[in-house]
Image (cartoon, helix red, strand yellow):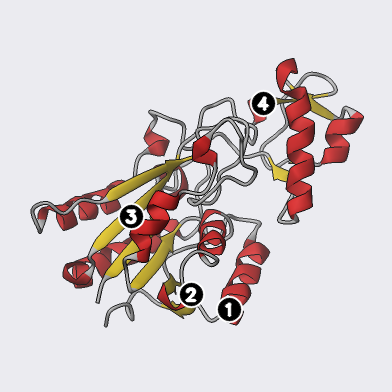
């Protein structure tokens, strides 16, 4: 029986209370993941860790946009296609204006949610981008317990023109950027497992979208959602509840970290 663990964005900016986009409950989520690895690490064949990876200038960050007075929007501002077309918000750099209109329009057609402006987070080369230290230490212990075993890391989100909640593909693919399209290399590695336990942050966003993108590509009987190892971004709890109902209807297994591989 081959069992894999897929950890979604367990980074300081999400998991540490000092993080710029700290998720309530993430510290406890990480501790439960650590306890699980300590308990059943010898039975886990592979661990994959995704990393949100951003530039300061990014389509979901304030610096990409300007309002009618030339000021950047506040974090958690929602920008719609009507807002961009009316001039309520525009691209701060003129060469991105056409793309800005096209992007928010494409997002709305997908029907998931409108563009939300986030506090800058998981910036490349910063403390916030690093894996939460207690969990990072446990991952190193897992590697060291068996020579030759490595945690595999997958970065996402460095394309400034699109959002990349899911570890599998960007919200709107960029024709000029292969990394914004389906990550078949990761999919093929995950397919080798009989059980794929999914945990990390945040339940309402990156974990939800990664799982949704896995469903058409990997048999659902392989997927396991660890319900006590992920939390919602504050204010977006309804998205998390909708996602949980969705996966249960599809027959994806849900369990706690204490039950995994018991």
Name the disc covering residue 220, or none. Answer: 2
Marks 2 & 1, CB-CB < 8 Å contact:
yes
Residue 70: tell me if it is visible: yes
Marks 3 & 2, CB-CB < 8 Å contact:
no
Disc nearer the start of the sequence (1/4): 4
Give whichever of 178, 76 is nearer the camera: 178
Disc nearer the start of the sequence (4/3): 3
Q: Viewer-nearest of labels 3 and 2?
A: 2
Residue 193 falls in image quadrant: bottom left
Question: How busy is the neighbourhood of tag 4: few (under 14 within 10 Å), some, or many (20 plus)?
Answer: many
Disc nearer the start of the sequence (3/2): 3
Marks 4 & 3, CB-CB < 8 Å contact:
no
Image quadrant for the N terminus? Answer: bottom left
Name the disc covering residue 48, or none. Answer: 3
At 46% from the left and 63% from the top, the residue drawn is 230
Marks 1 & 3, CB-CB < 8 Å contact:
no
The secondary element bearing badge 1 is classed as loop
What distance separates the C-alpha of mark 1 from that of mark 4? 38 Å
Say if 244 sits above or below 183 in the image.
below
**Residue 217 relative to residue 240: left or right:** left
Residue 120 falls in image quadrant: top right
Image quadrant for the C terminus? Answer: bottom left
Question: How busy is the neighbourhood of tag 1: few (under 14 within 10 Å), some, or many (20 plus)?
Answer: few
Q: Viewer-nearest of labels 4 and 3?
A: 3
Give whichever of 136, 50 is nearer the camera: 50
Q: Which residue is mark 1?
A: 250
Q: Which residue is mark 4?
A: 64
């Amino acid at each position: 029986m081959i069992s894999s663990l897929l950890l979604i964005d367990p980074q300081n900016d999400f998991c540490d209370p000092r993080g710029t986009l700290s998720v309530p409950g993430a510290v406890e989520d990480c501790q439960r993941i650590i306890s699980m690895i300590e308990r059943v690490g010898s039975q886990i064949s592979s661990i994959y860790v995704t990393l949100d990876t951003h530039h300061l200038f990014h389509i979901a960050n304030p610096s990409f946009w300007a309002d009618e007075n030339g000021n950047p929007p506040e974090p958690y501002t929602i920008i719609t296609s009507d807002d961009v077309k009316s001039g309520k918000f525009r691209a701060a750099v003129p060469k991105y204006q056409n793309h800005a209109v096209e992007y928010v329009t494409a997002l709305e057609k997908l029907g998931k949610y409108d563009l939300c402006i986030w506090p800058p987070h998981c910036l490349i080369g910063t403390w916030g981008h690093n894996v939460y230290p207690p969990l990072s230490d446990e991952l190193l212990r897992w590697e060291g317990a068996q020579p030759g075993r490595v945690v595999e890391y997958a970065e996402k989100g460095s394309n400034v023109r699109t959002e990349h909640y899911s570890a599998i593909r960007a919200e709107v693919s960029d024709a000029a950027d292969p990394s914004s399209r389906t990550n078949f290399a990761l999919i093929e590695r995950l397919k080798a497992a009989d059980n794929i336990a999914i945990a990390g942050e945040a339940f309402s966003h990156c974990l939800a979208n990664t799982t949704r993108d896995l469903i058409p590509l990997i048999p659902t009987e392989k997927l396991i959602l660890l319900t006590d190892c992920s939390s919602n971004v504050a204010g977006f709890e309804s998205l998390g509840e909708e996602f949980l109902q969705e996966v249960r209807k599809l027959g994806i297994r849900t369990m706690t970290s204490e039950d995994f591989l018991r």
